[in-house]
């Protein structure tokens, strides 16, 4: 049964520290003032995302808000249904993300994803 058009597709996530560590050690990174992004082209054609927000950013409410904002920006900006590219993506939030406008988060993420797409097409 196909999903309705307005249904939100859930992001596939990285599940354990070994998966995160592999992306950190073998992947490439891009830094912005709001977050750092680490990405690794994967063998399988699945797209997985991990978001980390450390305790120095704020309490649980603040950290969860940061994660929700990043997930929403990802969902709005990036088409995860493209089966041609498999990758693992880890986003580490920085303290500036807490007070940032949502539009600036989307803009920074768009720039990073464009750079990622350029480097993925070259390799």
Image (cartoon, helix red, strand yellow):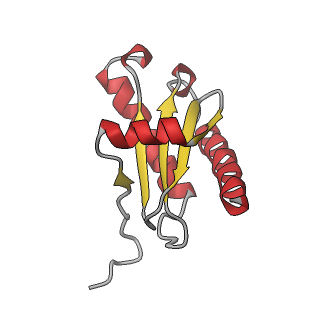
- Residue at 32% across, 25% down: 61
- Residue at 49% across, 32% down: 92
Residue farthest toward the top in the current orientation of the protein? 56
- Residue at 41% across, 43% down: 50
Q: Is residue 78 above or below residue 91?
A: below
- Residue at 39% across, 33% down: 65
Residue farthest toward the left in the current orientation of the protein? 1
Side of 109 relative to 42 (left or right): right
86 vs 11, nearest the viewer: 86
Q: Is residue 104 above or below residue 119?
A: above
Side of 111 relative to 98 (left or right): right
Specify whether residue 32 is in view.
yes
19 vs 113, nearest the viewer: 19
Side of 32 relative to 42 (left or right): right
Residue farthest toward the bottom in the current orientation of the protein? 1
Specify whether residue 68 is in view.
no
Quadrant location of the N terminus? bottom left
């Amino acid at each position: 049964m196909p999903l309705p058009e307005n249904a939100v597709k859930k992001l596939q996530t990285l599940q354990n520290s070994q998966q995160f560590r592999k992306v950190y050690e073998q992947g490439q990174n891009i830094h912005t003032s709001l977050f750092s992004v680490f990405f690794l082209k994967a063998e399988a054609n699945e797209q997985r995302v991990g978001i980390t927000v450390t305790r120095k950013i704020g309490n649980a409410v603040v950290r969860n808000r940061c994660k929700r904002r990043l997930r929403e920006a990802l969902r709005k900006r990036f088409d995860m249904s493209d089966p041609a590219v498999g990758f693992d993506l880890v986003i580490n939030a920085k303290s500036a993300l807490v007070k940032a406008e949502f539009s600036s988060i989307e803009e920074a993420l768009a720039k990073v994803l464009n750079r990622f797409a350029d480097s993925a097409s070259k390799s």
